[in-house]
Image (cartoon, rainbow, N blue to C red):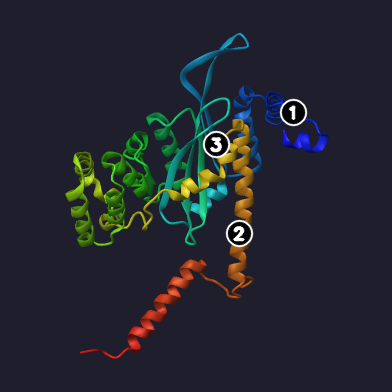
Amino acid sequence: MEMVKEVFGYKVKYGKAWKAKQAAFEILYGGWEESYNRLAMVLKAMAAENPGMYYMVEPHRVRTRIYNDAIVRIFGHAFWTFEPCIRAFKHCRLVMSVDGTFLTGQFKGTLLIAVANDGGDKLVPLAFALVSAENNDNWEWFLSLVRTKVIGPEREVCIISDRHLGILNAVEIDILGHPRVHHGWCMRHFVSNFYRACRDKELSDVLHDCCLAFTTRHFEKLWDKVYAKANYGGKDFLNRNLADKGKWARAFDNDGVRYGDMTNNMVECFNMVLKGVRALPVTAIVEYTFQKLNVYFQKYSEETSNLMSGKNKAKKMYKYPPKVDDWMEYQARRRIHTKSSPLIT
């Protein structure tokens, strides 16, 4: 509306501008219904030009509709992952976050996403799926494909997420020939659920610190403080989740399977990247993930090459990501300082 006013000096009504926008969508992506019909074709074309890409499009198990005087099954779900994502994950920490974000276009649905991060804490998007809603069947289907096509049979991975019932059930399923997955609860969602139970912001902040505690002694001190002051709803919440403290408290992550990652912020950060595309037809969403990741991997490949070759601001040849390299140098300085310090008796 503003562009037409600025260029042509004519004030367009909102309804006319909205119709023009829908017409532009149809020219670019086909109609909203047609985009679902074209989805498999778009993914197949991508896979043909990108060896190693994996995708799957399946109709709904039981729901049907009349289309061109014939009974056809409606769209069920679609999954896709790119070969560079699969290869990149082999060099990442054994942790990934999963989450769903709802679509806002003409047809409602949910986009499921799995994201990891590398040693330099850069996001590594791994896999995507379009489903009708977040439920048991769709989470089980998505995570089974993530485990078999992205993680593979060699690695035990920790999945961090909120406590959606579909995820809780899906991570408990055994897949023949593949190791089990560990499940870590997102600390931020856990504390938010506690706040809804007790409505006490101060106690919620203490529980937040309790989740982050490194030692069991510090954990127990903060836990006792929260429990003593919590109301009935808060105490009930704490009692129900104490047995699972290994899933939300860092002090009880005995095997270190979550590598210190206490939230699923990395997947929610990528959700923000997709915020503007959620209102587009599904083929546009798929194309956007392809284009975005193409630019993303190219950018960080060049950045990594510059770090390794010394063509960076520090003029230094890095063997490890800067964050890891700085930490190792700091530990080396500490070790030298400790050896050179006289003993105090």
Measuring 52% from the left and 47% from the top, which residue is drawn there? Answer: 270
Label 3 CA crowd tier, 10 Å (few <14, some 14–19, many 20+): many
Measuring 59% from the left and 33% from the top, which residue is drawn there? Answer: 279
Amino acid at dot 1: Val
Secondary element under disc 1, as helix, strand or loop, is: loop
N-terminal of the two: label 1 or label 3?
A: 1
Eyeballing the image, is 110 above or below 263?
above
Q: Mark number for residue 12?
A: 1
| Quarter of the image with the N terminus in it | top right
Nearer the observer, 209 or 300: 209
Amino acid at dot 3: Tyr
The Cα atoms of the two marked residues, 2 and 3, are separated by 24 Å
Q: Where is residue 28 in the image (x, y as percent from the top left)?
A: 71, 31
Position of 30 with respect to 152 (left or right) is right
| Quarter of the image with the C terminus in it | bottom left
Eyeballing the image, is 104 above or below 225?
above
Q: Residue 138 is drawn in which quadrant?
A: top left
The Cα atoms of the two marked residues, 2 and 1, are separated by 45 Å
Camera-near label (2 vs 3) is 2
Q: Name the residue under label 3.
A: 55
Camera-near label (2 vs 1) is 1
Amino acid at dot 2: Ser
Q: Mark 2 points at which residue?
A: 301
N-terminal of the two: label 2 or label 3?
A: 3
Q: Can residue 152 be seen in this view?
A: no
Nearer the observer, 61 or 343: 343
Label 2 CA crowd tier, 10 Å (few <14, some 14–19, many 20+): few
Q: Position of residue 161 (x, y in %)?
A: 38, 44
